[in-house]
Image (cartoon, helix red, strand yellow):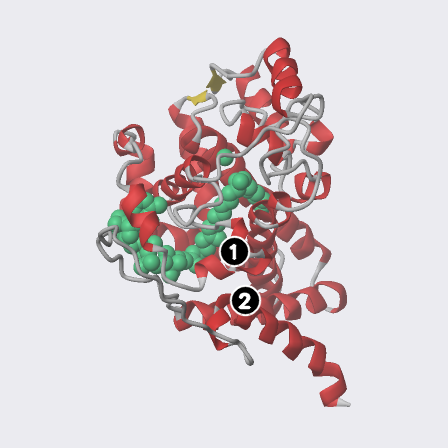
């Protein structure tokens, strides 16, 4: 019975492992072809070898098992207030990424006054997805070198790699090399971002793990076990997976109305789970739009509702959008209305 129950799990694990280590697949036939050439050899680049970071593998396995237990406790043991609190802290963490690290700090698609910046930096620390500075550095690289080895979560390396695998191994050398050319001067000059970056190892554990575990215990007498596994482990794991789906699912499945030559797609399920960040074909074409989507539908884009509210109370300003005629002409040139598919440069 155990073998029967666990064999699909072992099969999936094996597939994921082989996706990350293709050279270890059985029956791989390798052949060597030699050819003579008069062209001098270019300087030999050390071949890239994937190096798994086992510390991260162990931590993420624990996190996912703990989250599964948290899901069970959510239905059979935790108080309703704890479940509501877990949902609220997921939403807070999501805004710290979407309205903060992504639309404000990575893309500068709007400006925020200091009180809003401090609030977003706190929300961002609840999300624990690395400091805003590191997140934005990786994300700017993701846009500039999308789906190449310099893209930290290069989706051409498969679903597993772009979802979580990229956090389980050392980065490709191209990331470090091309990353040197990314302009980070705006964030280096931002006191809120740099404060969070410098003190991340103190601020993040307090915001992501300690406060969310203590609040249910002290405010409504929840047990430590329910608090830890539901409000902290399940909430954190769920918000990570929703974010990672933007890198994996929204780079694979959905429509491509704005540019059919790129992989990022419009994925409404991801948009719902990721607070409006699933409109990824539009976002890769017009990354400076503060809505990260053509339409400002609040149901499918809670982050836009939040930024609009902040603009109403004077905390957000200079929200950038894309004029309708520019969107239309782009659709005609490269999107669904383009007369012929745009040829991709094979050198790229
Ligand atoms: C996490 C992040 O989950 C998720 C990001 C998702 C992005 C989504 C994008 C989609 C947009 C929409 C948002 C949707 C939101 C929805 C919300 C819904 C809820 N440029 O990194 P190191 C250099 S994090 C330039 O250690 P290793 C640099 O010199 C989860 N240079 O590389 C650096 O030193 P320093 C929790 C770069 O050793 C040095 O390399 N966190 C760049 O190869 C070393 O950097 C974790 O689990 C660059 N881009 O290790 C931690 N990058 O920093 C996981 C690096 O001093 N990370 N350099 O300047 C790690 O353990 C490691 O990074 C590693 C690689 C093992 C993965
Ligand atoms: Zn993307
Ligand atoms: Zn982006």
Q: Position of residue 170 (x, y in %)?
A: 36, 61
Q: Is residue 124 left or right of residue 36?
A: right
Q: Residue at x 52, y 56 (%)?
A: 157
Nearest to N terminus: mark 1 or mark 2: 2
Q: Position of residue 248 (x, y in %)?
A: 59, 50
The residue labelled by disc 1 is 157
Residue 201 in view in this figure? no
* Residue depicted at 73% across the width and 31% down the height: 299
In the picture, residue 91 is in which quadrant? Answer: top right
**Where is residue 49, by image quadrant?**
bottom left
Residue 301 lies, with reference to residue 52, above or below; the image says: above
Residue 19: which disc?
Answer: 2
The quarter of the displayed image where residue 304 is located: top right
In the image, residue 263 lies at what x, y percent? 59, 40
Q: Compared with residue 268, is residue 219 higher up or lower down, i.e. above or below?
A: below
- In this view, the residue in front, 213 or 145, is 145
In the rendered image, the quadrant that contains the N terminus is: bottom right
Q: Are circles 1 and 2 on residues that touch, CB within 8 Å?
A: yes
């Amino acid at each position: 019975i155990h073998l029967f129950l666990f064999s699909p799990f072992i099969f999936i694990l094996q597939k994921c492992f082989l996706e990350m280590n293709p050279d270890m697949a059985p029956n791989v036939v390798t052949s060597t072809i030699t050819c003579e050439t008069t062209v001098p050899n270019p300087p030999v680049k050390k071949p890239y070898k994937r190096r798994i970071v086992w510390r991260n593998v162990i931590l993420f396995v624990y996190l996912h098992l703990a989250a599964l237990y948290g899901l069970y406790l959510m239905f059979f043991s935790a108080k309703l207030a704890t479940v509501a609190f877990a949902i609220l802290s997921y939403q807070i963490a999501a805004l710290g990424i979407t309205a903060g690290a992504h639309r404000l700090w990575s893309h500068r698609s709007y400006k925020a006054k200091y009180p809003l910046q401090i609030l977003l930096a706190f929300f961002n620390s609840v999300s624990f997805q690395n400091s805003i500075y590191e997140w934005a550095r990786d994300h700017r690289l993701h846009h500039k070198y999308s789906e190449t080895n310099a893209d930290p979560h290069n989706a051409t390396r498969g679903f597993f790699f772009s979802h979580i695998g990229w956090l389980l191994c050392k980065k490709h050398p191209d990331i470090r090399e091309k990353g040197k050319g990314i302009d980070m001067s705006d964030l280096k000059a931002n006191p809120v971002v740099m404060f969070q970056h410098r003190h991340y190892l103190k601020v993040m554990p307090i915001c992501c793990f300690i406060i969310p575990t203590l609040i249910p215990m002290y405010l409504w007498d929840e047990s430590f076990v329910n608090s830890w596994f539901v409000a902290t482990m399940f909430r954190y794991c769920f918000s990570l997976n929703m974010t990672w789906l933007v890198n994996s699912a929204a780079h694979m499945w959905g429509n491509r109305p704005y540019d059919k030559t790129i992989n990022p797609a419009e994925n409404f399920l991801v948009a719902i789970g990721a607070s409006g960040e699933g409109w990824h074909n539009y976002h890769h074409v017009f990354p400076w739009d503060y809505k990260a989507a053509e339409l400002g539908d609040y149901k499918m884009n809670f982050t836009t509702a939040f930024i609009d509210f902040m603009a109403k109370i004077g905390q957000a300003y200079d929200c950038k959008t894309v004029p309708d005629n520019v969107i239309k002409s782009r659709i005609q040139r490269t999107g669904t209305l383009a007369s012929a598919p745009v040829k991709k440069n094979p050198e790229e």
